[in-house]
Amino acid sequence: MRLGLLGKLRGNQVVISAINVNWKGGVHRLDGVTSKKHTVEIEIPFANKKGEGVLMFKAQEKKPEIITAISVQQPFRLLDVSPKPPVEVKEGERVSFKLRIGLPDYGYNGPLNLTLGAAAQEMVMLELPKVVLKRGERSVEVENPRSIISVLKNGVFQHSVQLYKALSYNDRVGSIKVGAPFSLVSSEPKTPFSIDDPNSYIVSLWIQAPDHNYAGPLVIELG
């Protein structure tokens, strides 16, 4: 990060011990700066990296990140920013925000806290009273402690299931499907695999949610 100092000299020294950037509830820390001037210019790098999150299990393009606003906490003042929000950052792209910050008129020593505003994310509510495991003509209901969950529209959630509810030791699983309106992103272990643990065999599924609210069973088909 590059830091440049602007403005006329004054008597009091401002020590910015760190620059704390809040983004979607997480805080990213950048180096601070010391100045005897009235303003300071800072640069905030932002990258929408590829392969982050659960969707790395499937080749799928992420939605762009949209920075809707930038704000700073008192006693600092945001005088100018370039580029001006809203700014859309597509997957794999980077952008650097150049901010001109007004400093307090007294000797300050502490962090500069700023927030990058994110576009509102659309959520869907999933009410799953039961999970059904199907293998051929056999159908078994499984307890579901997470019967109501809230996830991003078309987002991915994880669900783990004990396969011994429907299968036996040494059985082979060639494929896994989930019923509509869901779709399977990935599983761990990946298919095909055999039930090789005589005590317990749990498979973890990453499932893509629909773009609308849903109430009903989660049906998992084992091939």
Image: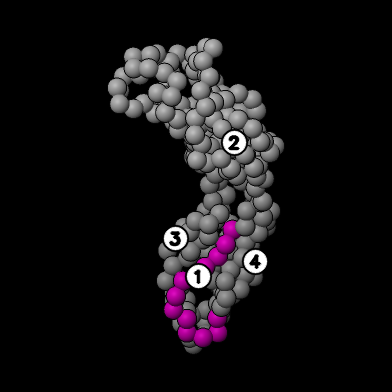
Q: CA distance from mark 2 to mark 3?
A: 40 Å
Q: CA distance from mark 1 to mark 4?
A: 16 Å
Which amino acid type is shown beneath numbered disc 1?
Leu
Q: CA distance from mark 2 to mark 1?
A: 44 Å
Query: Upstream in the sequence, badge 1 or badge 3?
Result: 3
User: On the image, numbered disc 2 is attached to which residue?
Assistant: 128
User: On the image, numbered disc 4 is attached to which residue?
Assistant: 80
Query: Upstream in the sequence, badge 2 or badge 3?
Result: 3
Taking 191 as reference, is 196 left or right?
Answer: left
Q: Helix or strand or loop: what does disc 2 sit on? A: loop
Asked whether the beta carbons under mark 1 and mark 4 sit within 8 Å of each other, the answer is no
Q: From which residue to which does the magenta span run?
A: 104-116
Look at the image and say whether residue 114 sits in the magenta stretch.
Answer: yes
Q: Quadrant of residue 154?
A: top right
Tell me the mark number nearer the camera, choosing from 1 and 4. 1
User: On the image, numbered disc 1 is attached to which residue?
Assistant: 112
